[in-house]
Image (cartoon, grey):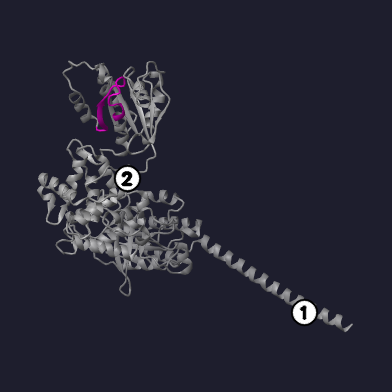
């Protein structure tokens, strides 16, 4: 199914650091490789040795670093190990104690130094091994390799007889360019989950007719893309025969199935042909960690702090399509197993952790609705555009980032134009503990009211579509800011630049809750005074309206609203499901970014100064105009007088 591939990754060199006990043959091994002769005398430590690029098929230069095993050289050796791409760890076949030191000292030392690179175990002086030693290399190495998974392979060689010396360094280079661990679990003898996900995506992309199998034409297109040459008919038959003999379900009447495709790659890896699978991975854009390369997912624009990124109509239509494709029971919602299958071509489900986990609307059974599905994508695109782009590609999107993502206009421009073109709004939710923030957020994503007044720890996000007047929909994202994290948030320079509207929730029956919410409003408004870039529309929400209101809070809140020039508090009761169109009013405030901005004393004084300044400019310009007219009249008079004389 392949030809011998050459390395197609982005490494320009491989750094091999050779360590081991004194007298194990480190320096002799290096010199033997470089000169193909066995040295009689050597310096204590060799200088760096660079092998030519054409020595091995991948044509990537190898630099070999010799090290001293003395205690005095420990610091320098540690520095070299931390710069290594691969470690070659030597022992002497005629000195069993040096083998014991591999697991007794050297491998634990690598762990202590946090050197997380492949390790090649090399037994030197194979020609001096005791022929009567009953323990084979496999018996000696198996327990060590089970305890230390970073060991890529073991090999014994002889520098004196030039036996398997080039092979030892070839394995070292190969361990870096074509690593085993990301692809294959040696313990279970199976493909790694991420490898399966990547191969599943590649198979899906190549299955043009979407019949669940690669026919001859599709298999040849795959072969040409990855290896530059087509398969002959007899080769295709041979591939299918090999698969069918070992895995009958790997081939059907349409061609090679996904199971057969996975089986072939597992077979390549088991036979040591990792470069074949890596050639496929790299051709389809994967890095060594089996995530897409940066150039595949990098967004094509720079995002200013007061800009955001949204999905284009093309991307949303693609997402609607894959939702319908994976909604196998056509019930309008994705069950957990259906959602898992949708993301089966990604390294992992992107929504298993905050801020996405539990952020969108679900059915009573916990299934994700289409609205919730699209809302999660909107949230991911706003918070992490490159992650969103990567997962679009993982799930089969074939367009470019420019066709999938849209950069919105800067918020400060929106305020000047007194309108916005955004479809996704980011709302910061402030308020003291037990004010009712969580109840509002739960209501927003259709979760039932809970009588338990639990305090939220850490930030919480919620996202949903909101109907506008006229039938259009906008996506609203609520980001709950815990009370004790407000100071830290506002200490950041651009903390409010990403905010479309800020709401301040307070318990309308509690005096302290109102006072604290008023303080938070003042803190946010004063942040806006620092720069017009941070001006944010603000709304007050009087929660728990089903309880007896605190009279002073009612009067004071109305006075504060009038003084600051913002809307009167929106009274809501989640317990009685009296929402008072609170989410629609939040969206309205976000759509009119020049309104509902608190009129602080600083802003009032700044406006007065501008008015005075503009008046002075007007006075100067009128005076200058009068002076010009006067000068013209004088010149006309002077000209007449001159002509009369």
Task: Give the side of residue 143 with respect to residue 631, left or right.
Answer: left
Quarter in which the C terminus is drawn: bottom right
Q: Which residue is mark 2?
A: 287
Q: Which residue is mark 1?
A: 633
Say which of 180 and 239 sits in front.
Answer: 239
> What's drawn in magenta, residue-wise?
149-167
Please state the horizontal and vertical placement of residue 22, each as a whole percent of the image: 34, 18
Task: Give the side of residue 490 with respect to residue 607, left or right.
Answer: left
Which is more N-terminal, label 1 or label 2? 2
Please state the horizontal and vertical placement of residue 356, each as a whole percent of the image: 28, 54
Asked whether the viewer can see residue 265, the reply is yes
Residue at point 17%, 38% (across, down): 189
Report crowding for label 2: few under 14, some 14 to 19, many 20 or more residues within 10 A (C-alpha): some
Compared to residue 127, the image places residue 88 above or below, namely: below
Say which of 280 and 494 sits in front.
Answer: 280
Task: Give the side of residue 637 with respect to residue 226, left or right.
Answer: right
* Residue 378 belongs to magenta span: no
Say which of 455 and 470 sits in front.
Answer: 470
Question: Mark 2 or mark 1, which is nearer to you?
Answer: 2
Please state the horizontal and vertical placement of residue 429, each as a whole percent of the image: 35, 57
| Quadrant position of residue 105 | top left
* Residue 166 belongs to magenta span: yes
Residue at point 19%, 42% (across, down): 266
Residue at point 20%, 24% (across, down): 137
Compared to residue 9, the image places residue 403 above or below, namely: below
Please state the horizontal and vertical placement of residue 525, each as a whole percent of the image: 45, 58
């Amino acid at each position: 199914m392949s030809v011998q591939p050459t390395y197609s990754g982005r490494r320009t060199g491989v750094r091999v650091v050779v360590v081991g006990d004194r007298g194990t043959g480190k320096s002799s091994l290096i010199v033997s490789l470089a000169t193909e002769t066995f040295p009689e005398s050597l310096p204590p430590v060799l200088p760096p040795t660079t092998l030519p690029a054409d020595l091995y098929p991948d044509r990537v230069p190898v630099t070999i670093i010799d090290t001293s095993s003395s205690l005095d050289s420990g610091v320098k050796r540690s520095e070299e190990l931390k710069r290594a791409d691969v470690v070659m760890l030597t022992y002497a076949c005629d000195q069993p104690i040096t083998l014991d030191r591999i697991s007794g000292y050297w491998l634990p030392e690598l762990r202590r130094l946090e050197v997380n690179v492949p390790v090649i175990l090399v037994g030197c002086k194979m020609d001096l091994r005791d022929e009567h030693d009953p323990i084979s290399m496999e018996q000696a190495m198996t327990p060590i390799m089970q305890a230390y998974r970073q060991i890529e392979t073991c090999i014994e060689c002889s520098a004196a007889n030039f036996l398997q010396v080039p092979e030892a360094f070839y394995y070292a280079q190969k361990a870096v360019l074509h690593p085993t661990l990301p692809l294959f679990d040696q313990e279970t003898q199976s493909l790694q989950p991420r490898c399966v996900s990547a191969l599943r995506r590649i198979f899906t992309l190549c299955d043009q007719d979407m019949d669940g199998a690669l026919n001859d034409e599709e298999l040849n297109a795959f072969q040409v893309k990855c290896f530059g040459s087509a398969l002959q008919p007899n080769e295709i038959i041979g591939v299918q025969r090999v698969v069918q003999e070992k895995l009958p379900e790997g081939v059907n009447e349409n061609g090679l199935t996904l199971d057969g495709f996975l089986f072939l790659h597992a077979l390549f890896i088991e036979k040591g042909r990792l470069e074949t699978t890596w050639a496929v991975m790299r051709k389809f854009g994967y890095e060594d960690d089996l995530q897409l390369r940066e150039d595949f997912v990098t967004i094509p624009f720079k995002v200013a702090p007061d800009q955001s990124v949204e999905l284009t109509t093309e991307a949303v239509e693609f997402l609607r399509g894959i939702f319908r494709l994976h909604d196998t029971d056509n019930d309008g919602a994705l069950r957990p197993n259906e959602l898992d299958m949708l993301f089966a071509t990604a390294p992992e489900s992107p929504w298993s952790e905050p801020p996405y986990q539990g952020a969108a609307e679900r059915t009573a059974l916990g299934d994700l609705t289409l609205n919730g599905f699209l809302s999660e994508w909107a949230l991911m695109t706003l918070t992490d555009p490159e992650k969103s782009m990567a997962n679009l590609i993982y799930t089969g999107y074939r367009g470019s980032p420019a066709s999938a993502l849209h950069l919105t206009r800067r918020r400060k421009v929106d305020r000047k134009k007194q309108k916005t073109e955004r479809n996704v709004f980011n709302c910061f939710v402030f308020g003291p503990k037990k004010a009712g923030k969580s109840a509002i957020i739960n209501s927003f994503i259709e979760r039932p009211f809970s009588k338990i007044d639990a305090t939220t720890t850490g930030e919480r996000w919620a996202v949903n579509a909101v109907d506008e007047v006229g039938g259009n929909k906008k996506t609203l994202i609520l980001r709950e800011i815990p009370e004790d994290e407000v100071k830290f948030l506002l200490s950041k320079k651009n903390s409010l630049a990403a905010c479309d509207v800020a709401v301040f929730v307070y318990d309308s029956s509690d005096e302290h809750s109102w006072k604290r919410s008023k303080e938070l409003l003042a803190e946010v408004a004063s942040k806006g005074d620092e720069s017009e870039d941070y001006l944010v529309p603000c709304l007050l929400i009087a929660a728990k309206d089903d309880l007896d209101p605190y009279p002073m809070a009612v009067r004071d809140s109305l006075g504060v609203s009038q003084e600051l020039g913002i809307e009167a508090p929106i009274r809501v009761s989640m317990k009685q499901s009296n929402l008072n169109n609170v989410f629609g009013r939040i969206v309205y405030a976000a759509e009119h970014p020049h309104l509902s901005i608190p009129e602080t004393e600083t802003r009032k004084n700044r406006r007065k100064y501008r008015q005075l300044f503009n008046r002075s400019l007007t006075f100067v310009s009128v005076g200058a105009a009068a002076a010009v007219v006067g000068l013209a009249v004088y010149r006309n008079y002077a000209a007449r007088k001159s002509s009369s004389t």
